[in-house]
Amino acid sequence: MKAILYEKSRSGAALFLRDVEKPIPRNHEVLVRIHAASLNALDYRPMNMGVGIPKSRIFGADIVGLVEEVGLDVSTFKPGDAVLGDISGCGCGGFAEYVSVPEDVLVLKPAEVSDEVAAAVPVAAVTALQALRDKGDIQPGLRVLIVGAGGGVGTFAVQLATYFGAEVTAVCSAQNAEVVRSLGPNEVIDYALEDITASDRSFDRIFAINGYHHLSAYKRILAPHGIYVMVGGSLPQIFKSLLLGPFLSIGSRKFRALAAKPKVKDLEFVIGLVASTKIRAVIDRQYPLEQTPEAMRYVSDAHARGKVIITI
Ligand SMILES: NC(=O)c1ccc[n+]([C@@H]2O[C@H](COP(=O)([O-])OP(=O)(O)OC[C@H]3O[C@@H](n4cnc5c(N)ncnc54)[C@H](OP(=O)(O)O)[C@@H]3O)[C@@H](O)[C@H]2O)c1
């Protein structure tokens, strides 16, 4: 089968289209013929840093495809089922024609959702859901600030926060403002024109998804009993949030960091919202499998608008 392999040489590391052995499903595994995948930070960050490379050397966590074969102990799926999943917990491998994964990481794809749209959902939408609901205890009427609203996680976070009834302020660049506005927030702020952390406003929840602001600046605009959730952003933002969050949490304001986990129940919930058109996937670009290296470069620049899809 064709796959995009990470290879390291004296001149550096890169991705190449290669022919590799088609996997054979073990007893509890499902062989999926992949139709589409999408890119995430958990692909490009390890690749750029040269750490956390999947054992198969094939990146790709979000997959959508058709079940081609099932192992002896598989009870949930049968050949021909359309499925999707986040396979980051079982070694990745989505930038390929086939992957063999445990049945418990997959869910059925609703027929009304296209392969490309479904591929955009697993990591990004589940991350947004776990940030808002599990770490952020989101409630109707809360004033919610989402910084980094234009990317994969951000575009889902804006819609889910709106769906949960929050009053949403989204921060992104001018280039993404129109798309983000179409997702239904109460307000969109261009970060080049206004530094929200320097304003005299306050928010009940702050979700830091991209960019960088000093934690004390976030603290200044976090209302009493408010919750700040660090989802991602620049590496200094991530390290400082992990290190200083517990100290800043003394008092009524809480500083938390998210470590999202693949959960099929959460994936079923968000793909259900997509199927019923309550939320949608924002797709920036699509690339064929052989152009995955180019797609990785594009997403690594951290200015993709929504999701970037690989079609196979
Ligand atoms: N905690 C977890 O478990 C978890 C899980 C998944 C992802 N993450 C992290 O979450 C972050 C976002 O992931 P993603 O998939 O959404 O990434 P992404 O799609 O690559 O994000 C790109 C977006 O970030 C925006 N952005 C870049 N610099 C910005 C800034 N200074 N201020 C505001 N927005 C800015 C860009 O908008 P503009 O072009 O408008 O600047 C672009 O739309 C990453 O850091 C990732 O590592 C964390």
Image: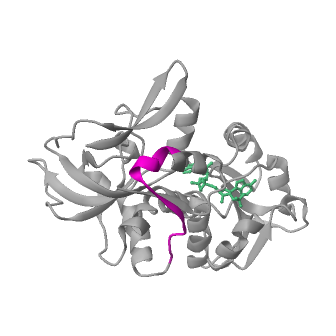
Q: Position of residue 267 (x, y in %)?
A: 40, 63
Was residue 280 drawn as part of the magenta stretch in this picture?
A: yes
Was residue 159 drawn as part of the magenta stretch in this picture?
A: no
Of the 4 image quadrants, the one containing the N terminus is top left
The quarter of the displayed image where residue 133 is located: bottom right
Which scheme is used to colour this image of the protein?
one colour
Query: Would you say residue 65 is visible in this rendering?
Result: yes
Instruction: Please name the residue shown 27% across and 52% down the image.
Output: 104
Of the 4 image quadrants, the one containing the C terminus is bottom left
Horizontal side of residue 33 vs 135, given as left or right? left
Horizontal side of residue 257 vs 3, given as left or right? right
Taking 1 as reference, is 262 above or below it? Answer: below
| The furthest residue to the left | 72
Q: Quadrant of ligand 1?
A: bottom right
Horizontal side of residue 195 vs 296, given as left or right? right
Q: Position of residue 258 (x, y in %)?
A: 58, 49
Instruction: Please name the residue shown 34% across and 33% down the image.
Output: 56
Horizontal side of residue 213 vs 24, given as left or right? right
Magenta residues, start to end: 279-293
Query: Would you say residue 51 is visible in this rendering?
Result: no
Q: Position of residue 248 (x, y in %)?
A: 76, 45
Counting labels gives 0
The quarter of the displayed image where residue 204 is located: bottom right
Residue closest to the eye, 145 or 275: 275
Q: Position of residue 51 (x, y in %)?
A: 52, 29
